[in-house]
Amino acid sequence: MFLKSAYFPGFSYFTKETCIHNYYPAKVLAKLDILDMEFSNITIFYGNNGSGKSTLLNLLAEKLSCERKTRFFKDEEWVVGPRGGSVHKLFDECVDAVDLTLEIGENGKPIDLPYHRKFITSDDIFKVLDSKKEFNQSVVAKTKEVNETGKRLLNDGYSYRGLGDFERLKDYNMMRKSPKRYIESKVSKKKEQLSNGETSIQYYMDMIENDGIYLLDEPENCLSPLYQLELRDLILSSRKYCNCQFIIATHSPFFLSLEGAKVYNLDAEPVGVCNWYQLENSIVWYNFFKSYQDLFENSSNQLPILTNEQFDELMELLKEIQCTERFINQVRGNEEYLSKIYYLLTHYSDLQEIDLKAELGIL
């Protein structure tokens, strides 16, 4: 862990200026009035829309000089008094007021901030998606243009008068032999265009490196539940094995329930640490699915039957986590148990920590 805590300017800090509370981000900080915040290896800012999650991340990102791929538009100027006066860059002043405390190393000195300090937002993902889309559209337009040029070349023929006509002669011969090859020689290949979710998870895999601090703003955007679980496992593995620290703004239960995470409820007054399953959004999800409990438990729409390859994989996983032969024999002939256990084991971050009997509640 690199960051131990942060002091954020609260209500008392801004009382020296009577009108400052009307301007961003002072109005958010004054409302939260959180002051000191202790961090963990994984720290989560939870709150409904407008609660200040992104504001806190942006302040930390600026204070840490985090790398960010998309431009940050900060409404930072405010004017004292209705008739003008001194102009303050309020956002920068708030960043200056944030005070960070670093973790103490074994030598008794504060640990240096890592080289990798990144702020990753959903805007970054959309930028990647848009750039690929724009590039591929330009390839389509260029392909059409080159194809028309090649057709005119064939219709006009060629006359070789000197070296100046050599390239035209090569193009003419190539177009006559293979229009496809001619077009490929003039136009770049399209970039592979994955789904939004596939692009997102690949982006996170590319961006998250060893020894780093990563600020993630609502990473659930664009991600299906399965991809959220995949990113969840990436975060846990990076924390455990790659010396990474994460500060995440989210209201997704998949990230709120990250093992060992410290969750700050920004909707609470005062702001404080809370268990993820006590949060409003988590309870809403729980009550929603609970109201359809009978449908899930009694319908024939169960998890799919395992293929032979999946069955073999499951047997190896059960041996890996040292399940007893008696347990394996109990589940071997039960398709429902097999499918549930396979799903759990292939979506769990640490196989050694899982208690199948407790997780399934059936054996």
Image: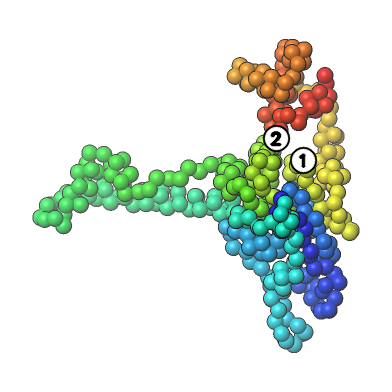
Considering depth in this image, is 125 or 349 the residue closer to the camera?
349
- Residue 195 is situated, as x and y percent measured from the top left of the image, at 56, 42
Q: State the residue lying farthest toward the right.
A: 269
Q: Which mark is residue 259?
A: 1
Q: Quadrant of the C terminus?
A: top right
* Residue contact at pointers 2 and 1, CB within 8 angstroms: yes
Considering depth in this image, is 245 or 29 the residue closer to the camera?
245
Considering depth in this image, is 237 or 46 the residue closer to the camera?
237
Residue type at mark 2: give it: Ser
Residue type at mark 1: give it: Glu
Q: Residues within 10 Å of mark 2 (few under 14, many from 20)?
A: many
Could you tell me which residue is drawn at 83 percent across and 79 percent down? Answer: 16
Q: Is residue 304 visible?
A: no
Q: Is residue 328 above or below residue 51?
A: above
Residue wearing tag 2? 349
Considering depth in this image, is 58 or 75 the residue closer to the camera?
58
- Residue 35 is situated, as x and y percent measured from the top left of the image, at 83, 64
Q: Residues within 10 Å of mark 1 (few under 14, many from 20)?
A: few
On the rendered structure, is 54 left or right of 199? right
Under circle 1, the secondary element is: loop
Q: Is residue 233 above or below residue 273?
A: above
Could you tell me which residue is drawn at 60 percent across and 56 percent down? Answer: 115
CA gap between label 2 and label 1 equals 10 Å
Quadrant assignment, res 174: top left
On the rendered structure, is 327 left or right of 77? right
Under circle 2, the secondary element is: loop
- Residue 357 is situated, as x and y percent measured from the top left of the image, at 81, 23
Could you tell me which residue is drawn at 31 percent across and 40 percent down? Answer: 180
